Image (spheres, coloured by chain):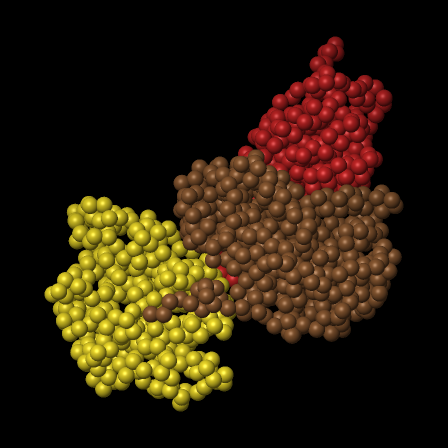
Amino acid sequence: MTMQTTALAPAERAIRVLGGDLTERSLRQYLEGLSGVDAVGLEQRAASLATRSIKTGSKAWALDRIIELIDLTTLEGADTPGKVRSLVAKALHPDAGDPTTPRVAAVCVYGDMVPVAVEALGAAHGDPDDGLVSVAAVATAFPSGRASLAVKLADTRDAVAAGADEIDMVIDRGAFLAGNYGTVFEQIVAVKDACRRPDGSSASLKVILETGELNTYDNVRRASWLSILAGGDFIKTSTGKVTPAATLPVTLLMLEAVRDWHRLTGEHVGVKPAGGIRTSKDAVRYLVTVAETVGEQWLQPHLFRFGASSLLNDVLLQRQKLRTGHYSGPDYVTID
Amino acid sequence: MTRLTIPKTYKLYIGGKFPRSESGRSYEVLGADGGFLANASLASRKDARDAVVAARAAVPGWSGATAYNRGQVLYRVAEVLEGRRAQFVQEISSSEGVTAAEAGRQVDEAIDTWVWYAGWADKFAQVAGAGNPVAGPYFNLSVPEPTGVVAIVAPQGEASLLGLVRVVAPALVAGNAVVVVADEAHPLSAISLSEVLATSDLPGGVVNVLTGSPAEVAPWLASHSDVDALDLAGAGALEWVDLEIAAAETLTRVMRPEPGVPERSLDRILAFTETKTVWHTKSLI
Amino acid sequence: MKDIEITGRGFLDYAPAPESTAILHLQDSYGLFIDGEFVDGSGGSFATVSPATEKRIAEIAIASEADVDLAVAAARRAHTRTWSKMSGSDRGKYLFRIARLVQERARELAVAESLDNGKPIKESRDTDVPLVAAWFFYYAGWADKLDYAGLGANPRSLGVAAQVIPWNFPLLMLAWKIAPALAAGNTVVLKPAETTPLTALLFAEILQQADLPAGVVNIVTGAGETGAALVRHPDVDKVAFTGSTSVGREIAKAVAGTHKKVTLELGGKAANIVFDDAPIDQAVEGIVNGIFFNQGHVCCAGSRLLVQESIHDEVVDRLKQRLTTLRLGDPLDKNTDIGAINSKEQLDRIRSLSDLGEQEGAERWSAPCEIPENGFWFAPTIFTGVSTSSTIAREEIFGPVLSVLTFRTPAEAIAKANNTPYGLSAGIWSDKGSKILAVADRLRAGVIWANTFNRFDPASPFGGYKESGYGREGGRHGLGAYLAAGGSSSERSERVETKGDNK
């Protein structure tokens, strides 16, 4: 059992909760000691949250807030500088016809596109709290994560050096499903370290669980806690490349982990559902779920994001409907 | 030279023991010819109370036994009864005034009744239970479970052994414990049957037999809060409506009187069961 | 970032989302539904009010003893001349028609139910009315398959069924009663609860649309006297009652000595047992659903929370947190979780029992919610430090009030759960399957929900042990309650002198 008693990287959160003798075994015991999840009950709770009816003033507020929480994303092999510039333009001025439309929180691109995004944002690059737009980069051999740690760390450092404010890493699902929790943990700790900039500040780290591959809700709960313990600033459902991607029950479950971490430590960890959220109606259900699970103070860009691309246009159509009183059409919003 | 026989003292059967009535009372049992047969115990309300306590204590063990085990025990009763057939034939014919052949047929039917019900012990739940196809992700199963303590007024005035067996055996199948008031005029075979039960692996307290006056004892059983079900099979000549009203006070289940000796039936097993339905969530993930 | 500012409160203070009542076309007054027609009653009338506003909805006739007589006579005629002679498949077709009509008018029925009863529209819309349709669909299919009901070949209908239903699920309880009765070939006289007659009368309109033969279903409105007259009527063959144990007791006495077959669904004081290995978030939801669904006006409500001592504080803390997100108010608002208490009388009972709980030393906590000015309301409330001897741990409160008790071992949980004269339902929360099954075996209750609570389905038998009543509703078992075995049982009932019938 030498492997089991091998000390793990001394991640600060994990030491606080698990104690100084942080080992594979103590981590495993902690994760396996978490309360189980009854899938039927979880899905019923999510379904009941989805029946909330958000109307008039609440709806107007929700639509704007959804925009402000979007990581506007393009993650294609065919991405070009032109495509990324176009994405940035949309991020800054989502609805050309309505200057009151808020900006999105961030643009999310592959690492090599970070310089393009940074340049295109120019003076508008910065903290969404200040009305600016951040740059998020997927890293660590996204989306599969099948590369050596050295490659994953280089991937991360590159993106941070190029000006990424946020790193969306993937966990090693293979290691997780094989029960090698320590491996997953150490990689997150190492990537977190690679997020550090020379000035001592850090890019924010979103840890993608790829819940569609973890398959069970018990796994999602364990992976959520593991990622939080290892230092993740956000836990994120999916890469968008695997089906199912974000679902309301999975997001609810991750919000419960974040809520319980807050109960335990007073710290705030963010949640990012990504992939598959395409309509305003859907997105509003996520806002309701956040508000009724962790509280509405979580509905701000440092604690909640939508990873999405087509969602934005549907929200814009709904905004136009609210403003004008009649239904709008796809030709009245820009394709990117 | 004739040998002087040893007459039996007929007592009550409560909690696996054979006590006299706590009241110290007994009554004369006469044969069909009017001659003296025995002094039977005249059970009191306190005997009834003690019997209910004994029955309640026996419920967890008997209902918790496997159905296979209950079936074997009931079959064992038939075996032991078969072995004492001659004694019952003699008692019945002297008490009821029937021929030995008729008494023999009654005993045979009683034995066969035990065998018939023994076979039901591990089957009735399959017939009366159900796997329910509910519209949702649930495992959902209904099973009949024993009601608990069943108080019975045995058929009166005819076929004393068979009447008793036809009401006691079905109540036992599901795992109930029984307090039975025997045929008042012909109590001897009831007490002899108690001796059979006592030597048949049936745990003490599962069957408790009271002899005496149903009119005196039944009201105490009917109104007893710890009696779960009341079988008025042999109460047709009593003020049985009052018994049903008394039982209603605690929603005790009631089987109304039935003339004669009840047939063997699955209904009689199910009458003393409660359907329990268990739901459990079902999910792969 | 803009602050969370919508209506001066927050996002969670969702803007009103009222369900439209325009769909509902109510009469100003309703008569009795006898022999296929609405007729005037001879017992006067009363107003049914909305418990959320105390406003009058409509004037409702009171059925006198003479009216009940007419209704039973109509049911008897319909049974003899029409319904018992009709083929099972035709009876089934009528029931299918009714199921479809309920679906077509589902929203209207849901609005009427919430208006009259005070329950949240999301419950009447998503639970009550869909289950009503499901109940008729389920039993419709049985009507021509009675040989498989478990009573042998050619089982007989009983005749005229007298059915008395409560105010907590007015239309759903109607469906539970009428659907199996008609499928089995009985005719019906049904009395809805005094405070919630509305949907039963709309249902009568549905029966007219379905062209159900006159007299097969008769609906007599009124208070307790009307129900008593119906139950005691000598020409009734079957009595089915859902309601309080005290009334159930009176009914059991009233039918003693008669030939009437009886099923009683009565009160409960269900234990909801939470073990330390429970899926905790789902357990908290199950506790909430168990006691606050329908304002706790549920006979099978999980009103006694038995929580393992080691997790008591955590569960109570999480529960309180969760209760702060419950929204109490307008039953017709789609976001309302907790509606109005059905009547002033019931509110008084909940209040006095809760006060008693405090006096007996339990610690009271109520969710912080604004109570509307008019109407009858009670905030979701939990009592901790409740002992098994406390009144609030033994008496059915029938309101949004939870008593929290603790246990140390599974054996203690079982003993405490069973330590009640009731035995309707129970809940078990654990991730350990073997423990769940063993505990379920030992609980003396008719319905046991493991890792869920308050689930209902027409295929699933429902009913209690002990003072929670007898007989089952739902499934094949529920059908059997309206049938007699073909030959033997009818002969038997003719042979037995039924003394009480002559009273």
* Colour yellow belongs to chain: A
Q: Position of residue B141 (x, y in %)?
A: 55, 53
Residue C186 visible here: no
Quadrant position of residue B96: top right
Residue at 23% across / 56% down in the picture?
Answer: A230
Residue at 61% across / 46% down in the picture?
Answer: C351
Quadrant position of residue A278: bottom left
Single out the residue that lies furthest toward the left. A198
Q: Position of residue C454 (x, y in %)?
A: 55, 55
Single out the residue that lies furthest toward the bottom. A331
Shade of chain C as shown in the rendered figure: brown
Q: Is residue A276 left or right of residue B118?
A: left
Report the number of numbered marks.
0
Q: Is residue C169 left or right of residue B222?
A: left
User: On screen, C256 above or below C173?
Assistant: above
Residue at 74% across / 10% down in the picture?
Answer: B1
Q: Is residue B237 left or right of residue C371?
A: right
Residue at 61% across / 32% down in the picture?
Answer: B56
Q: Nearer the viewer, residue B213 or C207?
A: C207
Quadrant containing the N terminus of chain C in the rendered view: bottom left
User: On screen, C129 above or below B41?
Assistant: below
Q: Nearer the viewer, residue B13 or A158?
A: A158
Q: Position of residue C285 (x, y in %)?
A: 47, 55
User: On screen, A313 above or below B166?
Assistant: below
User: On screen, B114 above or below B270?
Assistant: above
Q: Position of residue C159 (x, y in %)?
A: 79, 57
Quadrant containing the C terminus of chain C in the rendered view: top right
Residue A8 visible here: yes
Single out the residue that lies furthest toward the front. C8
* Colour red belongs to chain: B
